[in-house]
Amino acid sequence: MPNDNIDQAIPLDSFDPSGDGWEAMPLADVVAAGQAALASLQAFRLALHGCATPLNLKPTNDRIIEIEGQLKEQLSALEKARKVIETDTALAIGYPGKAPWIEETGGILSPKQILSMASRGKDVVASELTTYRAVVEALEPVPTLLARDRSIGFNAEGSTDWEDIAHRRTEQRYRLVQEILAEIESIDCSSCGAPAGSPCLTAAGGIAHLSHRPRQDAYKMPPEHQWVSTDVNRRPDNQALYPELRGKSWQEIREIVDSRQ
Ligand SMILES: [Zn+2]
């Protein structure tokens, strides 16, 4: 479903201009800020080399070199992304088999991630999405890093409420686990006979902590959800995540968590 909110006139590198108090930063400016940071690091290292006070500065120097290397790697990925987005290069043609700004070190929002979102329930055929613009236009607005940070409690002043962030993350984790469990239990279990919508049962008739093999095998966990994989079970103490929820029934836990939204 094309997203009508995206105006063709909006530059590709700032398709989400809703700053919500933040200054909208075009990708070119982000790259420039990163390059300035790299130059500052290099200036820091030059200052160390000129330091007249006799200290063991080697560990500091080594650490800066290491950080410089990591920063260069990220900047190179961002710069590639900038070029592809600015020129609206066909993704598959320019970079066969690999999105240009997916790096092993991760962290940069990519069309590949967007396509992965598309594959989960969005009305999009991947082969139709040839350019970044096509990807963006075919989807609902994509959460930027900024939007994600906002959603977990950073604000425009840069201050943070860590307790609140931890709380939101726990809730996010809990809700995701519930969604995954519902997905796993959305088919009949051919092992214990539990019908779709019900958890697996033990031989004694209790709720099984883990879904049986046939259900587990039928469910494919998206890589971005792996972080909750250890919680995907019906073990009450493990599932509760909040100390005050321990020992409560599933229904009670669900009511408490839902009431917090
Ligand atoms: Zn079962």
Image (spheres, rainbow, N blue to C red):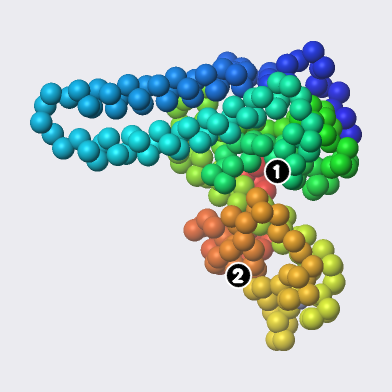
Residue depicted at 13% across the width and 23% down the height: 52
Disc 2 marks which amino acid?
Answer: Arg
Pointer 1 residue Cβ closer than 8 Å to ligand 1: no
| Residue with the most extreme bottom position | 203
Ligand 1 resides in the quarter of the picture at: bottom right
Mark yes or no: residue 60 visible. Answer: yes
Q: Where residue 167 appears, x then y in whole percent? A: 52, 45
Disc 1 marks which amino acid?
Answer: Lys
Query: How many angstroms separate mark 1 from mark 2 (CA)?
Result: 40 Å
Residue depicted at 50% across the width and 44% down the height: 166
What residue did someone put label 2 on? Answer: 235
Is 217 rendered above or below residue 99? below
Q: Where residue 2 appears, x then y in whole percent? A: 88, 30
Residue neighbourhood size for the residue with mark 1, other residues' Cα within 10 Å, grouped as few (<14), some (14–19), many (≥20): few
Q: Nearer the viewer, residue 57 or 153?
A: 57
In which quarter of the view is residue 134 placed? top right
Residue depicted at 28% across the width and 23% down the height: 46
Please state, as top left, top right, bottom left or bottom right, where the C terminus lies in the image.
top right
**SS of the residue at dot 1?**
loop
Q: Where residue 74 appears, x then y in whole percent? A: 52, 34
**SS of the residue at dot 2?**
loop
> Along the horizontal axis of the image, is 21 left or right of 37?
right
Residue neighbourhood size for the residue with mark 2, other residues' Cα within 10 Å, grouped as few (<14), some (14–19), many (≥20): few
Please state, as top left, top right, bottom left or bottom right, where the N terminus lies in the image.
top right
What residue did someone put label 1 on? Answer: 98
Q: Which mark is residue 183?
A: none
